[in-house]
Image (cartoon, rainbow, N blue to C red):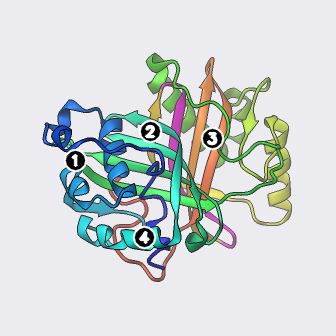
Amino acid sequence: MAVLALSGILASCGTAQTNSTSELNSNNNKMNNKEIVGTFLGAVAKQDAETMRKFANADYIQHNPFVPTGLEPFIGLLPVLKEHGTYAENVRMFQDGDYVFMHNIWKNAKPFGADEMVAFDIIRIDENGKVAEHWDAMTVLVKETASGRTQTDGPTTVEDLDKTEENKALAVSLVEDVLMGKNPGKIGDYISSEEYHQHNPQIKDGLTGIVEAVEYLTSQNNMFKYTKIHKVLGEGNFVLTVSEGEWNGGKKHAFYDLFRMKNGKIVEHWDVIQEVPTDGLANDNGMFGGF
């Protein structure tokens, strides 16, 4: 369970780089938030506790339910990952104000429950340029998907920075009207009928893929239900929504949905769905606390 607890907190540690000692002595605020996060996670990958302490607060707030809150307890768990050779590869990294959000693949992840896992991570940077808070969700990587796409492939380059707020509003409208069921008939207003690439392993491409999936889940009396949006983060044409909902017999789940927008429509979707645990918790901060 201690190893499972670390799911996602090391996001991008497989590729991040650690700065030199002289650079670390400079003001963190000279670095942008992506660089701060990359430096911190690079230090995590190298088991460099000194650098971790320079770039993160001692009272680092943890929302992964299996990881003790605070920096020192986290540092104390790092040798467990080293023992298993577990590491993460960053696929995408975005920034929205004080938040950096990432899309990652975990390798050698049997301690987490499978050889490979997919995760979304969010890290908040405080006013002093320090890593202050972390949220995540993780799921098993599936090799064969309904669309033929992987859970992480597709574009990574940010475009349309001037449309960030517009795209965030589009994502919220989709979640509220379609996924929360307020006005599902408006799905065509939000999702492109010409191009829609789907990375959920159980859903095919296009609007027809969504319709088929909904019909199947409904026939099985297992349709998911979104109940609350906790956070919306975006950079240009990419928007991540973090929602709470119910699935599989009314169990509470965290729904992380990443959307790519083009010309005012959603043209691509990735997600991670994780059941919210109730037993064996290492902290009481909650998976949605602090949002």
The residue pinned by badge 3 equals 177
Q: Is residue 272 left or right of residue 66?
A: right
Please determine whether, in this image, residue 197 is positioned above or below residue 130.
Answer: above
Circle 1/circle 2 CB separation < 8 Å: no
- Which badge, 3 or 1, comes first in the chain's sequence? 1
Write the start and end of the magenta stretch as one range: 236-249
Measure the C-alpha gap from mark 1 to mark 4.
Answer: 22 Å
Q: Which mark is residue 247?
A: none
Q: Is residue 161 left or right of residue 52?
A: right
From the viewer's side, name the closer residue of 93 and 240. 93
Mark 2 crowd level (few <14, some 14–19, many ≥20, 10 Å Cα): many
Residue type, numbered disc 1 = Lys
Answer whether residue 67 is magenta in the image.
Answer: no
Q: Which mark is residue 233?
A: 2
The residue pinned by badge 4 equals 65
Measure the C-alpha gap from mark 2 to mark 4.
Answer: 21 Å
Q: Is residue 105 left or right of residue 81?
A: right
The residue pinned by badge 1 equals 130
Between marks 3 and 2 in the image, the one whose residue lies nearer the viewer: 2
